[in-house]
Image: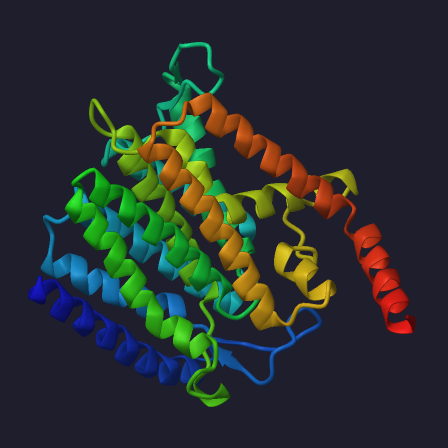
Amino acid sequence: MIFPIIDLAFLFFFSLTTTFVMRKVAKKIGLVDKPNSRKNHQGDIPLVGGISIGITLAYFLFNNPNILPNASLYAACLTLLILIGALDDKFDISFKLRFAVQAAISFAMMLLGKIELQTIGDIFGTGDVITFGWLGYLVTILAVVGAINAYNMVDGIDGLLGGLSVVTFGALAILMVFDNQYNIAYVCLVIVVTMLPYIVLNLGVFGRRYKVFMGDAGSMFIGFSVIWFLLLSSQKGVNPPLRPVTALWLIAIPLMDMAAIMIRRIRRGCSPFKPDREHLHHIFQRLGFSPRQALVAICTIASVFAATGIYSEEVQVPEYIMFYAFIVCFAIYVTFLSNIWRITAALKRWKAYRSNC
């Protein structure tokens, strides 16, 4: 047990050192996030969190090539995503190019790694396991692109992307330990540990001078890593250790937030990819929460969802119950989002009434 702890400690400091080095590189080449109408931070912030985590993870996989199936393919996909993400951070490339690269990586994952979404289980309670056949290729592409962009879109306040990622990978590690899948569990733990230095710097623990952002390079590879491990855990083998419906609960907040936002944008006649300030973290701030309070609240909610998924998986709650319960939660979320202005106005009136009493 002592050796994994030493290895994890080394990876933590390797990631921390890499982040400090990449900060200086980013400032020299202009890979920084500048304040604008949607970004209220002060000064130019290096966009190197994802790059530093990716370098650390690549170093780990290079020294442990047999710890995962298709580890080299996974590392190659991460490298390409980080490269495209960094170019997007620097030059703001077309979303069509990003989607094309994400789709190409999906094909590589399916054709070379044999990892694809072929079944979603008995989510309707009919007794029949739903499989996709050749449609599995299309569904997998949609799942990969959706997961990548869900984590990209949720990255809006300090610590949120890192916090939600820790919840997802931490929950997945617990499930893998329960099923004696120790290698996958360990890699999930490695990702969590290598992400901690970024979270510390992103939250400004060492002061604003050392602050860094994740950047699209990080959010893209994190979203891809999430879907890679979920598919690896739920689709491979005769008796996969993770039922597909459980995955919904592990990524509930990013998934719900992306879907609800896109539905609302389409209803208004806007592009579903047009940036705005109506994500969950914006709503919490509109309700009077500070950014740090919003971070804690959202990560707590995500942890409750993940804990529900873990518990349901372990006691084998029927898949259709888990699926319908998730749909109910999503419907409540969409309703809340659609009526946020009324809710905000009502809360303000209630606060004004209380202050006058």
| Horizontal side of residue 145 vs 59, given as left or right | right
Figure quadrant of residue 282: bottom right
Q: What residue is drawn where x is 41% and y is 85%?
A: 28
Q: Position of residue 31 (x, y in %)?
A: 46, 75
Residue 170 shows in this picture:
yes
Quarter occupied by the C terminus:
bottom right
Q: Position of residue 271 (x, y in %)?
A: 69, 45
Q: What residue is drawn where x is 50% and y is 57%?
A: 300
**Figure check: 291 above or below 94:** below
**Figure check: 126 above or below 257:** above
Q: What residue is drawn where x is 37% and y is 61%?
A: 83
Residue 250 shows in this picture:
no
Give the farthest residue toward the front.
357
**Figure check: 42 above or below 327:** below
Q: Position of residue 132 (x, y in %)?
A: 40, 18
Figure quadrant of residue 87: bottom left
